[in-house]
Amino acid sequence: MTDTSRWTAWGTRFGFSADGGIPGDTALTVAAQAAPSPDPSSSGAAVTLPPLVAGQTVSVSFWARAAHPMRVLTTIQGDAPAYATFVDTALTLTPDWQLHTVTGTAPPDVAGGPQHLTLHLGGADADIALGPVLFSTEPPTAAAVRATVTGYRPPQLVRDVSIPSDPGVVLAGRLRIPGFSGPGQRAKPPFPVVILLSGSGPGKRGVFPLIEDRLLAEGIATLDYDKRGVGESTGTFVDTLELMERDAAAAVAYLRTRPDIDGRRVAFLGLSQGAYVGPAVAARDPGIAAVVMLAGPAGEKGTLFTDDMREKLGKGGIVGAANDRVIAALQALYAARIAAAPPSVAAPARQALVDAFVAGGWSRAQADAVVAELDTPVILSLYQAAPNDALARIRAPVLALYAGRDTVVLTHRAMPEAQRALRANPNATVLEIPGVNHGFQHVDTHTPGPLEPAVSAPEVLDLVQRWLGDRLHAGSKMN
């Protein structure tokens, strides 16, 4: 039996909640679309089956209910691009939890790859709730079901949570709590927890699924959330570092109110922007237990940004005195913005930056476009970032990993800065992981191919799992 968290939903809102009516006490609710779609596959939910071979019979049983009786197309099919289907049926869902079973025999064209049980919910006009899934080689008897679910405890409990931050901002979070880590081993509350922070941009939950699985196996809970103004979170999305820090601090405060979380064992794991935000919060909160930063920016305030800008300008053909002129004009514009200077001061500073780009050989259109990108609150917050100051003030253990093939946060510059900032911390480790990109993947992100989740390199997953397991003492809470 696989737990409810293994369902994947798409095309509409969905969430996890407690429900004592099914084994494992966790339900996934998939919301009806605002208007039913003529395409039944425009929204739905799927769960991956165990590997099959040609000619193998598989039965898939799952708990489901609907807000009112309705018919739902249900298939068992192979993966893209063919999506070969060998079960295609309609099931009737009712307002009561029921165990539904579909059975089929795998043909050769799906054997050897992943297969999925899929509920096609595009035409659903009411919410659908789903529970855990049973796999077997034949339709299970009532006695077999009872034997399987008696005393069943899932490996994790998933709960959607609401995290209050600034006025008008409530973050939609997903908290994963350890359950049974193995035969006879149950993690006990209160749990240590790792807050997962993604990179810049409108990030949603679910960026680090492989890390979450590893941490849960260590008896460590995980929390991630939609950024403000993104997904189910309220507020307006403005991706400045200051706002991201306030939201991360709000997540810490929320977790410390929960009786199932050990507020003394709260850690951060962040990638890129998240690897700046986590340390910045930890520098102000001595109660943070550990920090993992993946491709974290490092350097002194102001010079971190301008050094990076100089390098990018050089690659764009602006070198020597022309390079110096652009940097000086940029610093003057940012000084005006920081001082909230009136338009009579800021506008000439902005025009001087455009003129500096033109003098360096760029067209007026190119200069206008790049200055429009640079003259924003988000980029200004990067200019004001002071990661080395934060790193130097952290007394918690720190694991800082840098990627050997990173083209976003340049390892040859950031890593020595991180080492320098953390030199007084005896519990800091700074390492380069060769052969991985900015997302700590062994893939070329510029070449079309299968998508891999962020942080999929096995050596990174192993290292992070062991390091956080040791620092958060997860083993002491197992029996």
Image (spheres, rainbow, N blue to C red):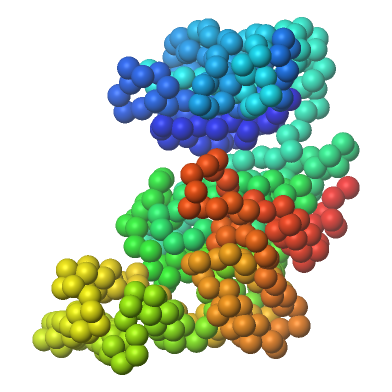
Depth check: give the residue in front, 467 or 448. Answer: 448
In depth, the one of 97 and 216 nearer the eye is: 216
Q: Residue furthest left?
A: 344
x then y, percent, for residue 22:
65, 24
Q: Please name the residue shown 58% across and 47% down the image.
A: 453
Left or right position of 246 against 323: right
Residue 279 location, quadrant: bottom right
- Count of numbered tags: 0
Tell me which residue sits at (53%, 9%) in the image.
Answer: 88
Determine whether 31 is above or below 244 in the image. above
Residue 446 appears in view: yes
Q: Which x, y percent locates residue 183?
A: 87, 36
Pick the front one: 299 or 466: 299
Q: Position of residue 194 (x, y in %)?
A: 65, 58
In the rendered image, the quadrant that contains the N terminus is top right
Residue 162 visible in the displayed image? no
Q: Is residue 299 above or below residue 92?
A: below
- The x and y percentages for residue 17 are 56, 36
